[in-house]
Image (cartoon, rainbow, N blue to C red):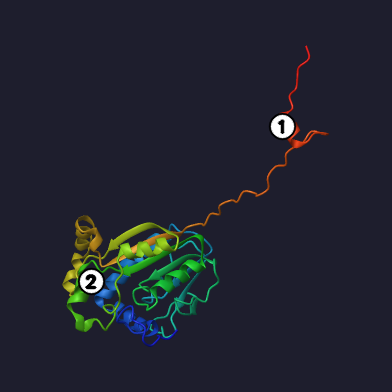
């Protein structure tokens, strides 16, 4: 789907099939690789407890297989049309996240890593995920957090806001939970992560564990990103009572009014 001229952009990024290779290139940098390793562990931990028959990951951030811990046998990754930066051994298909080439109510688990904040159609993306998920199906969602040092950096260095990942519209956990609730999802997990400052310095790498422990203990809502796991709620139907009314039984030979006032005498 091409961008509609005159429509306000959701973020500063180019179309998803253009910006996604830029994001993949950023994930190949030192700090991007650290983030990818952390996110891969989080996703694999979440998937280990989710079951079903079909698992779909929408968009890949690097060449690693993030779905290995899943017990779901049918797994595939959907790439975007110009997404040729990385290759994986998983079966894949090509499509746009706001127009998923999948049947309704056909997927048990969807992994959505940072797609919504880079798409110009985040609401449509989430609606499509809801459409293809079966009732009680799950979504595992990753999104950059505006209420973090990373969000502050994005605001303070405007000349870099034309490139990934800083061009994206960061989405808070509160906003994501509201959107999910409107579509009938119950949020099961909401976890902030990756608390190290958004700088490329390699000297910070040995302190990664210290940053994470301090962040989770002292400022848990200020992680660079959030992981949300949500379950699609089953729609329950309200039974409708029949409109018919029971017929009044009339004694033979008597009118209804007579039958209503008739008395019986007991014979001694």
Asked whether disc 1 touches disc 2, contact meaning CB atoms under 8 Å apart, the reply is: no
Residue picked out by circle 2: 151
- Closer-to-camera residue (248/238): 248
| Residue drawn at 19 percent across, 67 percent down | 206
Crowding at dot 2, Cα within 10 Å, few <14 / some 14-19 / many 20+, comes out as many
Q: Residue 102, percent across and down?
A: 53, 73
- Closer-to-camera residue (123/139): 123
Residue picked out by circle 1: 260
| Residue drawn at 17 percent across, 76 percent down | 156
- The image quadrant where one finds the N terminus is bottom left
Dot 1: element: helix
Asked if residue 174 can be seen in this view, the reply is yes
Q: Relative to residue 105, is residue 115 drawn left or right?
A: left
| Residue drawn at 42 percent across, 68 percent down | 111
Location of residue 32 with respect to 45 vertically, above or below: below
Q: Residue 267, percent across and down?
A: 78, 14
Dot 2: element: helix
Q: CA distance from mark 1 to mark 2?
A: 79 Å
Asked if residue 89 can be seen in this view, the reply is no
């Amino acid at each position: 789907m091409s961008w509609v001229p005159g429509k306000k952009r959701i973020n500063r990024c180019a179309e998803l099939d253009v910006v996604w290779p830029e994001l993949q290139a950023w994930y190949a940098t030192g700090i991007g690789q650290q983030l990818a390793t952390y996110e891969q562990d989080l996703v694999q931990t979440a998937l280990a407890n989710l079951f079903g028959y079909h698992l779909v990951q929408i968009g890949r951030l690097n060449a690693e297989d993030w779905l290995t811990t899943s017990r779901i046998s049918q797994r595939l990754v959907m790439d975007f049309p110009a997404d040729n930066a990385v290759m994986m051994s998983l079966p894949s298909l090509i499509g746009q996240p706001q127009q998923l080439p999948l049947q309704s109510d056909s997927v048990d688990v969807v992994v959505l890593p940072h797609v919504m904040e880079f798409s110009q159609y985040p609401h449509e993306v989430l609606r499509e995920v809801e459409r293809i998920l079966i009732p009680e199906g799950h979504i595992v969602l990753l999104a950059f957090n505006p209420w973090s040092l990373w969000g502050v950096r994005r605001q303070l260095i405007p000349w870099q806001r034309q490139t990934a990942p800083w061009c994206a519209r960061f989405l808070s956990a509160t906003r994501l939970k509201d959107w999910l609730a409107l579509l009938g999802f119950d949020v099961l997990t909401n976890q902030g992560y990756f608390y190290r400052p958004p700088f490329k310095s390699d000297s910070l790498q040995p302190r990664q564990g210290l940053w994470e422990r301090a962040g989770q203990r002292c400022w848990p809502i200020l992680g660079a990103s959030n992981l949300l796991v949500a379950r699609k709620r089953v729609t329950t139907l309200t039974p409708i009572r029949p409109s018919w009314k029971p017929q009044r039984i009339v004694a033979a030979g008597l009118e209804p009014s007579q039958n209503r006032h008739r008395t019986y005498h007991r014979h001694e």
